[in-house]
Image: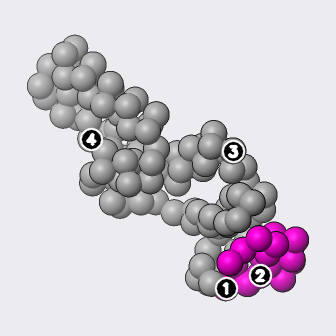
Amino acid sequence: MRLYTVHATPDDLILVREKVSLVAMIAPLPWLLWHRCWIAALAYLGLLVVVGLLAPAAAGAWIGLGVHLLIGVSAQDIRRWTLARQGRPIVAVVAGSDRETALFRLLSARPDLARGLR
């Protein structure tokens, strides 16, 4: 079973799966921008600048690798934080074998969330 957090807006439900993101680990900046995590993207760029200016080349490469690993592991948490900042708090946690099953289980347990969906 996979776990999803559910973020509600008046006309939409966003399900965010709990997982490690390999794409975010390999290419953090495009992943952050794709998911509209603007503050996290700016923080990532700022960290790269600081590490580039202050750390020697070899140490900077290791620090950069560590930052990439950290972003990949916590990518979905960054998305949840961004959604909460945008006024889309977590309203439920649901499990399912895939996204559709999780959505079905959610709407079966919480029919009030189906209101306003297209």
Of the numbered discs 4 and 3, the one sitting upstream in the chain is 4
Please report the residue visible at 31 percent of the width from the left and 45 percent of the height from the top. 29
Identified by mark 1, the residue type is: Thr
* SS class, disc 2: helix
- 73 in the magenta segment: no
Of tags 4 and 3, the one toward the viewer is: 3
41 vs 3, nearest the viewer: 41
Q: In what quadrant of the picture does the C terminus appear?
A: bottom right
Of the numbered discs 4 and 2, the one sitting upstream in the chain is 4
Q: CA distance from mark 4 to mark 3?
A: 32 Å
CB atoms of marks 2 and 1 within 8 Å: yes
Q: Is residue 75 left or right of residue 28?
A: right
The answer, for residue 74, to whether it is visible in the render is no
Please report the residue visible at 33 percent of the width from the left and 39 percent of the height from the top. 66
Please report the residue visible at 38 percent of the width from the left and 54 percent of the height from the top. 34
Q: Is residue 2 left or right of residue 71?
A: right
Find the magenta span and give its range.
101-118
Kindly identify which residue carries mark 4: 65
Q: Residue 105, which numbered label? A: 2
Kindly identify which residue carries mark 1: 101
Identified by mark 2, the residue type is: Arg
Of tags 1 and 3, the one toward the viewer is: 3
Q: CA distance from mark 1 to mark 3?
A: 26 Å
Kindly identify which residue carries mark 3: 87
- 105 in the magenta segment: yes
